[in-house]
Image (cartoon, rainbow, N blue to C red):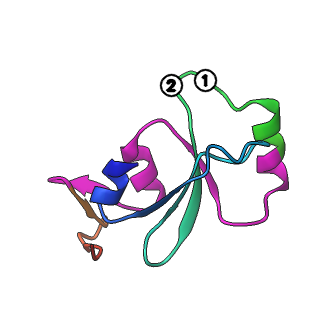
Amino acid sequence: MEDLRRLGLSVLDLHTVGKGCPDLLVADSIRSLLVEIKMPGNSLNRLQQLFLQRWKGPPIVVANNVDQICRAFGYEIEKGELAHPLIWRIRE
C-alpha cells in the first residue's frame, strides 16, 4: 500500500470487510478501482467470485504486484514515478 501512496495514489485498506470484498480501494484524481491482491498462481475463492459477479461499482482488478495495479490505471512506472503512456505525470 505504501508503494502505491508514494506514487501518488490514494489507498483504502478493505481486507477486513470480508464477504468476498476486494482487499483495496485505489484511486487517482479521475477514477477508482477495487483491487484483489493474489499471490501468483492463486485464484479467487467462491465468495470473491460471487462478489465480482454481483458488483456494479468501479472495476475490480486482480493483481499480484504494484506494476499491475498501475497498468490497470493506464500508468507505467518510470524512474520511481507514475507516468501515463503519453508521459503525462499525475499530481502528488
Q: Is residue 62 above or below residue 59?
A: above
Category of crowding for the residue at label 2, using alpha-carbon neighbours closer than 10 angstroms: few (below 14), some (14–19), many (at least 20): few
C-alpha separation, residue under disc 2 versus residue under disc 1:
6 Å
Q: Amino acid at mark 2?
A: Pro
Q: Who's the residue at 66% across and 27% down the image?
A: 43
Nearer to the camera, 62 or 9? 9
- Stretch in magenta: 51-80
Instruction: Point out residue 54 in the picture as x, y percentages from the top left corner.
Output: 85, 54
Q: Look at mark 1 in the image and give the residue it sits on.
A: 42
> Is residue 56 covered in magenta?
yes
Residue 40, which numbered label? 2
Q: Quadrant of the C terminus?
A: bottom left
Q: How many marks?
A: 2
> Is residue 64 covered in magenta?
yes
Q: Disc 2, disc 1: CB below 8 Å?
A: yes
Q: Who's the residue at 70% across and 48% down the image?
A: 17
Q: Is residue 10 above or below residue 77?
A: below
Instruction: Point out residue 32 in the picture as x, y percentages from the top left corner.
Output: 55, 67
Secondary structure beneath dot 1 equals loop
Q: Is residue 43 above or below residue 13?
A: above
Instruction: Point out residue 85 in the picture as x, y percentages from the top left corner.
Output: 31, 64
Residue 47 position by quadrant: top right
Secondary structure beneath dot 2 equals loop
> In the picture provided, is 20 more to the left or to the right than 90?
right
Q: Is residue 74 above or below residue 90?
A: above
Q: Residue furthest front?
A: 16
Q: Who's the residue at 27% across and 57% down the image?
A: 6
